Image (cartoon, helix red, strand yellow):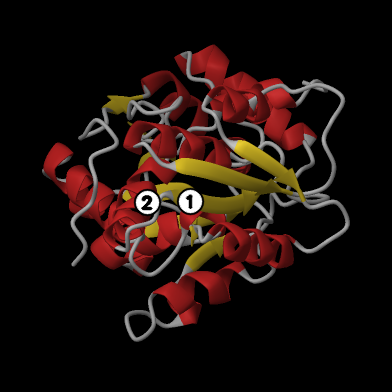
Amino acid sequence: MITPVPLGTWPTPLEAAPRLAARLGLAELWFKRDDLNGLGGGGNKIRKLQYTCAQAIAVGATTVITSGAPQSNHARLTAAAAARLGLSCVLVLAGSPPERRQGNLLLDGLAGAEIVWSGERPLAEVVAAEAERRSAYVIPFGGTAPASIQGYVDCGRELRAQLPDADGVEVVAALGSGGTMAGLVRELGAQRVIGVDVGAVPDPRATVAGLLVGEVEPDALRIDGTQVGAGYRTLTEAVRAALEVTARTEGVFLDPTYTGRAMAALLAGSFPHGDRVVFLHSGGLPGLFGHPEL
């Protein structure tokens, strides 16, 4: 077992959301506030980075490199983690530089990350070339690797301690690169975790199952695919409405890519669930400011 490097503030709060619960017809709803974990604006990637950065340091790396979309929360938090640990950071981002740096992209630069744009080339190809040139340690897309899902095993254990009667509670979380859902499933069981696909990977079921080989059958995973819309980078009307409802009932701000989609699915009733739900707030607030169409 890898010993994680300390990057966040734990446990994160578990907050009741009674007004939104009433709107949803739930007996109880809580927000697990993994957006309030301290580093770089907060978010679920910090739990994973505690393990991947520990691996980088263990092999003597002085530079880490990772990839993502221009408004990647993972890229922002990798840059922040590298700054905290005294490592250099290279971010390979998809496409070409925008006219204005805003949202996560602005924060990447503030944290001192060097940004390489992939242009028309595949991200993986650019990452491999840059990593070889710099002898950098590669942190996978989304920070998700077999070792890093332990971060969300840790989160599941926190939930058990915060809710003594947690056995009857279901957890709803956005499903991007798969590590968050995989860790929760390992700790809480497949029937208690619902992942809402955001369109980040072609086959989310295979992705999550691949992180849990021998632990769970792929068909046992509870995955909702109703909120992908036109794709990962697009903003749908259902997500816009979910952002507004959550802010106006509980004063909690969600992001348009991950938590907004997860809440849109919950509001739509697009998957069966019980009447006691924990909604994992996985962060992403800076991404709001990268979507001027909001």
Q: Which residue is mark 2?
A: 48
Q: Which residue is mark 1?
A: 64
The location of residue 138, given as percent across then percent down, is 51, 60
Quarter of the image holding residue 188?
bottom left
On screen, residue 129 above or below 98:
below
Left or right for 255, reference 293: left
Q: Of the residues under marks 2 and 1, which one precedes in the sequence? A: 2
Quarter of the image holding residue 293?
top right
Q: Nearer the viewer, residue 263 or 182?
A: 182
- Helix, strand or loop at disc 2? helix
Q: Nearer the viewer, residue 80 or 213?
A: 80
Confirm whether residue 177 shows in the render.
no
Q: Name the residue rendered at 64%, 71% in the picture.
A: 203
On screen, residue 259 above or below 286:
below
Q: Quadrant of the N terminus?
A: bottom left
Label of residue 225 in the image: none
Instruction: Give the tally of numbered discs.
Output: 2
| Real-space Cα separation, disc 2 to disc 1, in angstroms | 14 Å
Q: Name the residue rendered at 48%, 37% in the picture.
A: 77
CB atoms of marks 2 and 1 within 8 Å: no
Q: Name the residue rendered at 55%, 17% in the picture.
A: 247
Question: Tag 1: Cα neighbours inside 10 Å, few (<14), some, or many (≥20)?
Answer: many
Q: Amino acid at mark 2?
A: Lys
Q: Name the residue rendered at 83%, 61% in the picture.
A: 121
On screen, residue 124 above or below 27:
below
- Helix, strand or loop at disc 1? strand
Confirm whether residue 134 shows in the render.
yes
The location of residue 157, given as percent across then percent down, is 18, 51
Left or right for 123, reference 14: right
Question: Tag 2: Cα neighbours inside 10 Å, few (<14), some, or many (≥20)?
Answer: many
Q: Amino acid at mark 1?
A: Val
